[in-house]
Amino acid sequence: MCGIVGIVSSEPVNQLVYDSLLLLQHRGQDSTGIATIDGSTVHMRKARGQVREAYRTRDMRALPGTAGLGHVRYATKGSAANEEETQPFYVNAPYGIVLVHNGNLTNTRELTDELYRIDRRHLNTSSDTELLINILANELQAQIAGTELDLDQLFTGVSRVHERVEGSYACIALIAGHGLLAFRDPYGIRPLVLGRKPLGFVGFEWIVASETVALESQGYEIVRDVEPGEAVFITMSGELHTRQCAANPTLVPCSFEYVYLARPDSVMNGISVYDARLRLGNRLADTIERYTPRGDIDVVMPIPDSSRPAAMQVARKLGVEYREGFYKNRYVGRTFIMPGQAERKKSVRQKLNAMGSEFKGKNVLIVDDSIVRGTTSKEIVDMARSAGANKVTFTSAAPPVRYPHVYGINMPSRRELVAYDRKIPEIALELGADYLIYQEVDDMQSAILEGSQVKDLEKSCFDGRYVTGTVTEEYLRWVERTQLS
């Protein structure tokens, strides 16, 4: 999971890219980078940490140009501590390309071998983004016959990328002297949205970003989502060109975006994240009614912030009082994307404080958006008991996470997942809860997709079905070995 943005304007874009990254900060806090193009010169600044920490006035002055892109990183491939793997990545041929990427490639072993043996290209990191930019550069180079890059050559190059690359990827690239290229994998697993803003009476300023919140908050009109397999090219003068570059595209967006990752005020693939979370709460309430003894719930409480819409609907539908029992310290990052178990456990106590007056002597139903490793959930149950709760019922607006997620979310090892190879009563015992209730997989899908044109979701971490069709048991074992080594 990462956040990406690209902008083409008639004015300097450094501040616009910076402001966009602030709005996408929830998608990654490991590191950040901005690149701009001034004429045919690429300027770049990369740093570890969050956006507000990474850039000073002198850094922004060193990023001139009317086209730029930016990235906030949550490491899923490579090391979060390795600054060399911070995006954007740059290659000098053809023309000079700088690229940011949100997603995860699943055939990195084969691609690494091909780049070395066939394409004769060297990789300096273990980042799949470096793989991706070199493949794009190699395929574009193979198409160019003269000195200029025309649209047919550009889009054919993207088509060749789709043929070679497997997994999830939403990409934005700047091609020095030419413009901005954005493309999305043939399944549209990771999000990418296009927006524009009028430039006087002639032309538009364009933006491409991971979420609509980066567009709306800065006055851009949402045009549409970039389609699965589609490539969008915006010239330096603001001309828009698009083409479908995949043979058999089909939209299967990631369910976890709606459950947890995206901001609630974003719209993805025509689906409001906030509305989807309300509907998840409605479906969850039905399940709670079936499995929880009547009278065992005095209050419903959310784990702020992403579970709040679902919790409100659970309380309303059950006819039980809704209370805010946990106070959140907003200066601590999202615990799910902390790098290690010990760090997550420590961060929970720093991030949340249970207010004893809301818990003492009560049967509490706690609603969380999801339960992944169980580290956070176990600490929260313990906090509720320490604050005086009589009984603790823990509920998840998402189904049990039983399988690795290989498309850009850091769930690589089955052994890390609290629901792996456990029945629900066993998970409840592990978490220390009196009762544990999960959303059903079918209920999650129908709640998210209700009223939309989307037909299916990528939900492999819940049902073990990998939509790209190329994820094998051998690959999953390899990912686990390399991640844990």
Image: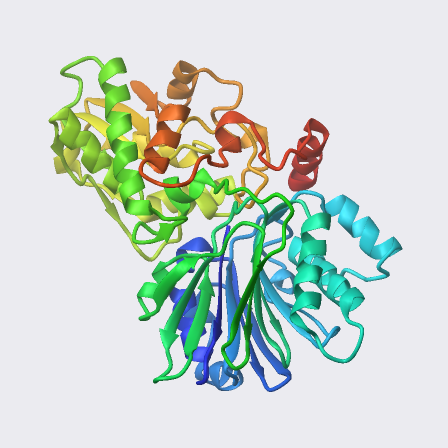
Where residue 41 sits: x, y (%)? 63, 84
At a point 47% along the width and 72% down the height, the residue shown is: 7
Where residue 91 sits: x, y (%)? 71, 70
Judge whether 397 appears above or below 270 on screen.
above
- Indicate the quadrant where residue 443 lies: top left
- Indicate the quadrant where residue 232 lies: bottom right
Where residue 267 sits: x, y (%)? 35, 51
Can the viewer see residue 171 in this picture? no
Which residue is more in the foreground, 296 or 43?
43
At a point 77% along the width and 66% down the height, the residue shown is: 143
- 350 relative position to 105: left or right: left
Judge whether 92 appears above or below 454 on screen.
below
At a point 59% along the width and 47% down the height, the residue shown is: 186
Judge whether 5 appears above or below 271 on screen.
below
Quadrant (top left/top right/bottom left/bottom right) for the C terminus: top right
- 321 relative position to 230: left or right: left
Can the viewer see residue 134 in this picture? yes
Which residue is more in the foreground, 449 or 358?
449
Which residue is more in the foreground, 263 or 379?
263
Which residue is more in the foreground, 18 or 393?
18
Judge whether 139 appears above or below 286 on screen.
below
- 391 relative position to 33: left or right: left
Where residue 388 sits: x, y (%)? 19, 29
